[in-house]
Amino acid sequence: MARLIRTEKEVEGRYEEVWTVVEEDALDQWPAGPLEVVGQPAQRQDGLQRARGEARYTADVRLPGMLHAAVLRSGVARADARAIDVLPALELPGVQAALSCEEVDFLDAEAGYPGAAVAAVAADTIEQARAGVEAIAVEWDESEPLLDPDEAIARGQLVSESSSYERGDLEAALAGADVVVEAEYRTQSVLHNSMETHQAVCHWEGDTLVVHISTQYIWGVRDELAEKLGLRPDDVRVVCEFMGGGFGAKNGAGDYSLIAAELSRRTGRPVRCALTRREENLAAGNRNATIQRLRAGARSDGTIVGLGGEFVNAVGWSGWLAGTDGPMQMLYGVDNVATMLRGAKLNSAPMAAFRAPGFVEGTFGLECLLDELGGKLGIDPLELRRRNHADADVLDGRPYSSKSLLECYRRAEPHWDRRHEVRARSDETWKHGVGLASQVWYGGGGPPSYAWVRVGSDGSMTVVTAMQDIGTGSRTAMAQIAAEELGVSLAQVRVELGDSARGPFASISAGSSTIPSMGPAVRSAAGDARRQILELAAQRWQKEQRTLSLKGGRIVCSDGGSWPLESLLGLLEDAQILGMGARGPNPTGMRVLTFGVQVAEVAVDVGTGEIRVGRIAAIHDVGRIINPLGARSQVEGGIIQALGHTLSEHRLLDPRTGTVLTQTLDAYKLPTIADVPEIVCEFVDEPDSHLTNLGAKGLGEPPIIPTAAAIANAIRDATGADVRSLPIDREEMLRALAALARAKERSGDRVAARPA
Amino acid sequence: MRCGFWRNVPWSGVWHEDRGVKIRLTVNGEPREADVWAGESLLTTLRDTLELPGSKNACEQGECGSCSVLLDGALVCACLVLAAQADGHEVTTVEGLADREELHRVQRAFVEAGAVQCGFCTPGLVVATAALLEANPDPSDDEMREALSGNLCRCTGYAKIFDAVRLAARS
Amino acid sequence: MQLVRPSSVEEAVAALRGGAVALGGGTDLVPLLRDRIVEAETLVELHAAVPRGVRRCTPTSTSPSPSSARFWIGAGTPLAVLEAEPEIPTTLREACRLAASPQLRAMGTIGGNLLQATRCWYWRLKFPCWLHGGETCDAKEGQHREHAIFGNERCASAHPSDPAAALLALGARIRTDRRDLPLAELYRLPTDDDRSMTTLEPGELILELELPAAESSIYVKAMDRQRWAFALVGVAAARVGGETRIALAGVAPVPWLVSSPEELEQATPLPGTAYKLEIARALVQRALAQL
């Protein structure tokens, strides 16, 4: 039965208290460990379609009469578009319609960053549309851009109210500490670069707007487009069956879908608006750069008594304050913590959520600081983290719904113990070292989310829900959950997803929430279908329903009898069994978080600054694992994205004009297969007994969080040099080595530096 | 006040004209014809005219490998080949690696090993892997790193791609 | 625009008269055409016209050391062929192997590779920079971490070709449809009056290369990632006829010869490229030690 409750809702680390309709979740959790289907490695159900090139992405949608839209974007960092004349565009061959910021409110004449959209043209071909855009006459009223985050803060140019947090008395704690360390860390802006760029194809069927879009949130796009276009939500149908990656940048509708919808309305033809790779890297979001001025104090026994951080997020023209301060507040059991987080409003592209926004950046600073502290204290980094473990939530003393970070540490030991052997490989040129870092993140998901399960007389079992699979394999995980509950093989279950007109509301695929939000709803729907099957079976074979269960594709009675499922389902003919399920509430009064630790092994060429990451061991605690094969792939993918963030990726801006210089994939260096280290991946795989009928948390984000700090700490272990700025490219590495050499010269210390 | 100029728009001038060229080429073993303009890329022709959207357009600059196809057996980026250059040549796309109902061993191995995530880079990687195994039936890890370094993947972390290549090499 | 597809050198040379643009592997030219950095009414596809292949050859009269073995390479030979060619000097083979990506090496020809345009982002984004005919080099004032440490007075762009450095270290010669010249003479630092980076005349076509066998040679390369990146610093070193030569990629607007390791100290790095000089010192020392 549905209930209306007041509950906390969390997305990407942001909490809000909301009224939510939830349905009770009557199912008990399955026992821990691998089951018949859940917990077993499963191949992707749609893998062959993808591997044969048959999967149809938004990029592949071709509709009869479809037009192509091109977008006029500002060429400078800060300018007002005045006197826009689109008429010259309309006179060109093939051009069917044009719109500008003077007539629609989703485009802004105040172009606050290079790449800001101010007008668009639809034409028969993309080339004609581009020619149309070039023909648009605009007067740009340019002004001096603001690009320096510190200067923006000094001038009071903030994107939103600053966020301050305090517990205990930091200054007193630092004054009384035996050891205090202080350092400034910087992280760069990086670009999502999903392989499929942001895009949408819109067309109208009567009063219904049909939107094919590469999105992480079908229902969010529906609501956003309805609101901005003045439509009823159900007059917008959003379709996304196959999706080429998002990483947080595709949570919203984006201006491209509004442009396509409006141009389609005007022309009566389908309109595609697809960003090029360059547009993607100009205007489709980024992980913002940060500056972190951090302090830590500890007693000589390793108890951290205080942590303090002044954080600046270089947010860009708009955006929100990602929680760079979160790890400092949440990761350790420290009594005295004070943080201040400010968001600089700059003439650069707006940030967008990017896989654990804020926590990736904040964990780099905090976990490097911890090793610097450990070095001064002479305490082993793993031991230092153990001594400061938080046994209950440090924000408000709530119990954790589950936490196995100490178990992660225990499992990290054999990897950590390799450090002596690894260091011993060092020679004159290559210095080897090992580093580690911990991680905390959200990932509990939440209501509402719904699923249906349809069982037909042919024995087919179909999960129906209007969720999206952004490439992580959620489709397969949902099928596994339904198959487990229905006691059938994975091959018997299919999942219909990706269309708001063909299924119930489903969660956003962001904030590591797909599995923990959707999984319980699917299990609940399958459970409902199972109950109905058993009801019918009880009547068919005149048994008490409580003596019946589903197993191995059979109806099994506790008295020893069993019948193939088909012998019952075959009686249905055109009748169907329809199971309905909903995501139950999160446990009240508890903190639901994910934890983990990674150990990195690196080698540094001290002559050329080359860094090679040889091995990363990742141990994560995310509750129950549904599909170990997919889960490992998520961890590997997170680590490789982190590797790029740590070593080679950097959105470079021209310091005078603010132009993004790294728009293409030769200049913006994503890791290739040649950069991949050995990755060892372990899960605690213990269901969270308080969380839903599954006990599963999300895994999309945790693995990207600790990697940068683990690598930087390994570099310090190898060389003694402090690398405090990402990316640690050759310039940064050589700078750090030179700084170390100068420091040694000054202190007259000729002994090879290495933290104790 | 001055006029903004076209220095950081996603295209720098429109390169297109309507004058058509007819090309004849063999695609996936079948003779095909297409009307193209002289600067049109083979990728555009494959995807939009010949209705073979398996090869993906992800950078249009030859930097990501998502549009990898075989041109007379050589692994190339279809976005950098002019369609008119392919006139008279043989092209194999991801759709043509396997016979109609059959599955290519590389495709099967990618699925079995879990080397497919969002799958947008997968067609290019599958074609590149097929080309690698054709030239080198038992590649070492270093040879895989070398041979597949032109195919960017943003999801998998590549680790399972090594598994897939090994699996395909054995099968 | 039209594409012509000559089947002989003569036809190609004829087709190139009057401002037509030669299309080799297309890996650099096609994006430049798309961006209209290069404009062409006629593209001349060289595939069937320009020779390809590698063979040992007898020294020509112009060879500096006529006694030693030499190699002939057709300018249309893809890099992928050269990286798999066991006979040619190691520095060239390695420079090809470490260049670009497998797809680009399968397409890109050695002749085209020598004529690659810079990867300077300002130039590629069509900033009105000095190299595009403007007043100043945007990179010098702006972001230049990938830029030059030599020859950067006017333009700080870096030459991206790895094989060019290798061929320069080997003392290779090239033959065009109208002359035979040392590779070193193909390149020139641009001047205010003439901002081109090569001495090729309009319509001039590189047909073949000739290079000596080396007693020993090596190519080492520093990149931002393990593969598929342009050189931050590439160092080619070769010992030919008892003489050792060093050439660098990625450090100057053109491939750069240094007569000795000491000459590195004459570099003029920008604030953001000083680290490249450090890398160059280390790599030159290592290359010479391994020679």
Image (tube, coloured by chain):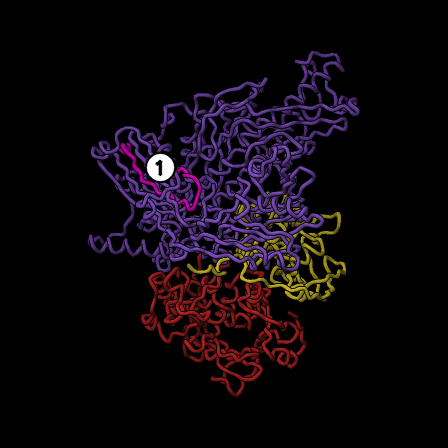
- Residue kind at label 1, given as amino acid type: Ser
- Asked whether, in this view, residue B64 is left or right of residue A66, the answer is left
Position of residue B31 measured from the top left corner of the image (x, y, whole percent): 76, 61
Q: Quadrant of the C terminus of chain A?
A: top left
Q: Nearer the viewer, residue C151 or A234?
A: A234
User: Callout 1 environment at 10 Å: few (<14), some (14 to 19), or many (20+)?
Assistant: some
Q: Is residue A437 visible?
A: no
Left or right for A25, reference A376? right
- Name the foreground residue: A751 vs C61: C61
Q: Is residue A755 left or right of residue A406?
A: left
Tag 1 residue: A162
Which shade is chain B?
Answer: yellow
The local secondary structure at tag 1 comes to loop
Question: Which region of the structure is painted magenta?
Answer: A301-324
Q: Quadrant of residue A229?
A: top right
Colour applied to chain C:
red
Q: Give x and y (percent) for residue A177.
A: 22, 34
User: The N terminus of chain A is located in which quarter?
Assistant: top right
Identity of the residue drawn at 36% across and 71% down? C153
The chain that hosts pointer 1 is: A
Q: Specify the farthest residue to the bottom.
A: C61
| Camera-nearest residue between A257 and C250 | A257
Percent across and percent down for residue C40 are: 59, 71
Residue A303 located within the stretch drawn in magenta: yes
Q: Please state the horizontal and vertical placement of residue A707, each as a whole percent of the image.
A: 42, 43
Would you identify the image quadrant in which residue A506 lies? top right
Relative depth, front residue between C32 and A486: C32
State the hue of chain A. Answer: purple
**Can residue C186 be seen in this snapshot?**
yes
